[in-house]
Image (spheres, rainbow, N blue to C red):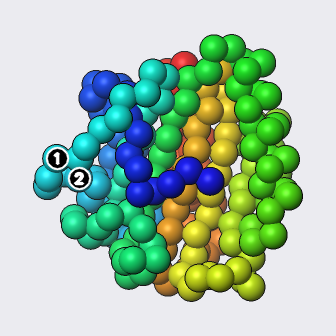
Amino acid sequence: MWSLLLLLGAPAAMAGDLCSLVGTGKLDEMLPAGAPWIRFGAHEPIPRIDVPGVDMCHFSTDPHASGNEFIEPNAARLAIKRIVMGSAADAETKLKNELQAWRKGTIFDVYPTPGLGSDAFRYQPKSTAPNAKGGAVFFTGRRANVIIEESLYLPSGISPREQTAAAQLLTTILKAPEAK
């Protein structure tokens, strides 16, 4: 699992492109339980670590959120990470390895999500997992050599409608020309 505590990012222009694909207005419409959404760090500078081929965008309902649901269980959060691999084969291998690792875990249920690509999957904490209060769902999908990872946390839990909206958001990002 990638940490919401660390904001990995490519150059600001690349991250801006990813954030502009989502936008707070779209989030307010698709995920009203978290509205009004704000871009994480929009009110203060966020330290960045430049990693070639990786960019990330965070949204929250709390302008001062750290991105950690265990510290701030009442703030909704959405994080999206785009990873550009060297080839489609590299991306496919990475996803297969991640899926295998998640399936070995004991606190997450893992489900295939073929609507997000043949090797896409979703995982979420089992109801018996420690700190399972609220709701979290994670999606991983791929288009050619681009992997998109998305995590959504809503303090009130995640309904089937919200889970579908989160999957649709990932699909929108995967289909965007900027995802190439």
How far across and down, in percent of the image, does residue 27 sit? Answer: 39, 57
39 over 131 or under it: above or below: above
Residue name at image x 26 percent, y 59 percent? 38
Q: Nearer the viewer, residue 47 or 37?
A: 47
Measure the C-alpha gap from mark 1 to mark 2: 6 Å
Say which residue label 1 marks: 45
Q: Residue 57 location, x and y as percent?
A: 38, 44
Q: Could you say which is closer to the camera, residue 85 or residue 48?
A: 48
Residue 61: name its quadrant. bottom left
What residue type is disc 1 on?
Answer: Pro
Whether label 1 touches label 2, CB < 8 Å: yes
Tell me what residue is drawn at x 72 percent, y 55 percent.
Answer: 122
The residue carrying mark 2 is: 41
- Which element is circle 1 on? loop
Residue 52 is left or right of residue 164, and the answer is left
Q: Residues within 10 Å of mark 1 (few under 14, many from 20)?
A: few
Q: Amino acid at mark 2?
A: Gly
**Callout 2: SS:** loop
